[in-house]
Image (cartoon, helix red, strand yellow):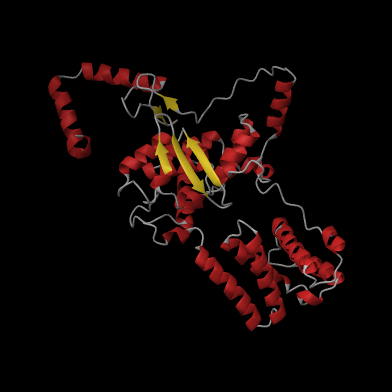
Amino acid sequence: MKDGTTDRFHATDEKYLSYAHNVLQKALDRGAVTPDDADLILHFIAEIQSTSASMSACRIFKLQSVLVYWRKFVPPFRTNTLNDLYVGIAELKKAKRANGQPYSQDTQGDYVKILRRFYFWLIENEYSTIPEKKIMKIKGPAANLMTKTAAQLLTEEEVRTMLTKCQNSRDRALIAMLYEGGFRISELGRLHWEQVKFTDWNATVNVSGKTGKGRFIPLVMSRAYLATWRNDYPLDPHGDAFVFLTETERKPLQYRGVAKQLGKIAKRAGIQKHVTPHIFRHSRITHLIQQGYQESVIKKMMWGNITTKMFATYAHLTDADIENEVAHKQGVKTGKTQKEKILEPRQCPKCYTINGPTQNFCGACGLPLTDSAEMQVRELKHVLENLPPEKIVEIVTRAVMENPTVA
């Protein structure tokens, strides 16, 4: 099934390289860059490709696009003075997107970093006479670490409620994995069954996503939901078959479709927040921090890299988190009850099967897993004990006729 549909989330390498070629050629055709500018950009990219172990096609496209865009604010690269760069950076900060909105703090910072890197290369190769020390002093806006606030994140209770409002096993598995694994939606959209391994107590997933770093993710809470979806899967759930498919056409998921479906489920759950596929990742990482997981474990599991600088961007702690940690470290007992583990999986005490947090009965042996489920069973037994045998036969017969799959 590896048929090119994996670019429903990101373009293929071939397409990105084509985009990179086109953006430079179109800029040449309309006079936005000079032939010398184009040669310098291509030379710069070629050197990076030959000296870097991990220069993706997507990154090549971005570098070429950004350098072409810089020519809106500065003269030809070889002839630029230091003052030209100062003026250009100031103009970038005032620039607006096509929709009239200014460029974000992060975008401005990224563009300035690329310009600095390019000019270090120009100076090293004697294409520019600007003093290197002056380029080193150029700084873009600092990264914005508050792209999300704690109030925008989903609580464990909200994730649980969304799980209960799903109308099919695919959606339950998708939401459970988005949250517990902190997956990017593109990682799940391109996930194949051969990347999933089931054990007695968990399911493990190996992915290589946005950063190119491999991630090993053990799933406990999600295991039962994923196993149920595998049983309901409309095709053969093995090998290179995509794990998640659309309901009717049985094609790999698209971002727009996933976002729309999550919005519907959130509405059924009564959640007023703006629910996107990525908010589950932000929420999960914050919850792992709150639950005391080691920073190195979180980094390795969520980024595949213990030296990542992205950790701070995802740490959305509240004032209460800080207060509780200080009280704990100081040995102060605040009298607050321990927070219930809302999304903790339910292990059957009889057969030891790991069940999802919303499952009231064991999926393997049918044992009640909660007090309310046990009470339901007792009440049902009481009702059945007081029914005449012919009435019981009638009820069972009607149930089988209405749903033959239970027979």
Closer to the camera in the image, 53 or 371: 53
- Residue 29 place in picture, x, y as percent: 63, 83
Question: Which picture quadrant has residue 95?
Answer: bottom right
- Residue 401 place in picture, x, y as percent: 17, 38
Question: Which picture quadrant has residue 288?
Answer: top right
Q: Can residue 15 be seen in this snapshot?
A: yes
Q: Can residue 34 be seen in this snapshot?
A: no
Question: Which picture quadrant has residue 75?
Answer: bottom right
Left or right of residue 268: residue 280: right
Residue at x-position 14% and y-position 20% = 389
- Residue 343 place in picture, x, y as percent: 50, 31
- Residue 150 place in picture, x, y as percent: 65, 40
Left or right of residue 257: residue 241: left
Kindly give the residue lying farthest to the left in the view shown. Answer: 390
- The answer to whether 261 is drawn above or below residue 102 in the figure is above
Left or right of residue 269: residue 52: right
Left or right of residue 55: residue 71: right
Closer to the camera in the image, 24 or 232: 24
Task: Quadrant for the N terminus, please.
Answer: bottom left
Residue at x-position 58% and y-position 62% = 58
Residue at x-position 40% and y-position 39% = 226
Residue at x-position 69% and y-position 59% = 107
- The answer to whether 74 is drawn above or below residue 304 in the figure is below
Task: Quadrant for the C terminus, please.
Answer: top left
User: How many circles with numbers are drawn on the protein?
Assistant: 0
